[in-house]
Amino acid sequence: MNSIASPDLRGRPQADEPAPFLTLVNLIWDEKHIEHWIRFGHEDYRQHLDPQRSIVGFAPGRIIAFVRWAGNDHGTVASRLDVLRTVGRGERCQTVPFVRPGAEILLRQSGWPKVERVLLAIDAIEALGLDPSDVSPDHWRHLHNRLTAGEEPRSYTRAQHIAWLKRREVQP
């Protein structure tokens, strides 16, 4: 995989290089074979490597959903969806394939039935007129835990969202 351009002799980023401390995600789109895409999240950087590959970058603290799917002539081979919180310099993080340096994993599901449940939950949040990247991280953890345990998760509500926004205002 091609790497991002290196700094010039003075250590400054070149024009096609991301700002420091971004979380970088490698995206691939080889239709019906390998598909990696961002389901939601506000990107701060994008570099197209070729028609099938690009790199997107996210500032620290962003919430994103990263979907990885692989298939062959017989159908789906693997599917995974991760909801991640991007980290800043010096923060602890977990490693995630195709994500540099890593991120805080809020939700991790694999296998089409569970991935589909998460996609439906994201659709339900959007149907409320909410941006999934603004949803409380606790909701993504709840969804992860309930799906992992085979239990029915609670739906995200406007009241929860309002409470989360107020809590976020007073957190240091």
Image: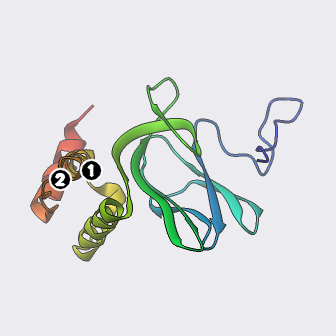
Instruction: From the viewer's perspective, tell me whether residue 17 is left or right of residue 141.
Output: right
Residue drawn at x 24%, y 48% is 148
Check disc 2: other Cα within 10 Å, few if <14, some if 14-19, many if 20+: few
58 vs 152, nearest the viewer: 152
Count of marks placed on residues: 2
The residue positioned 14% from the left and 57% from the top of the image is 153
Describe residue 18's horizontal placement relative to residue 136 as left or right.
Answer: right
73 vs 18, nearest the viewer = 73
Q: Amino acid at mark 2?
A: Gly
Left or right placement of residue 139 versus residue 104 in this view: left
Q: Please say if 131 is above or below 169.
A: below
Q: Position of residue 158 (x, y in %)?
A: 14, 64
Residue at x 74% of width, y 46% of height:
17
Q: Which residue is mark 1?
A: 140
| Contact, mark 1 vs mark 2 (Cβ under 8 Å) | no
**Nearer the camera: disc 1 or disc 2:** 2
- SS class of the residue under badge 1? helix
Residue type at numbered disc 1: Trp
Residue 83 position, x and y percent, is 38, 51
Q: Quadrant location of residue 171?
A: top left
Q: Is residue 34 above or below residue 91?
A: below
In the rendered image, residue 70, in percent from the top left (x then y), is placed at: 55, 62
In the image, residue 58 lies at what x, y percent?
A: 53, 48
- Read off the residue under disc 2: 150
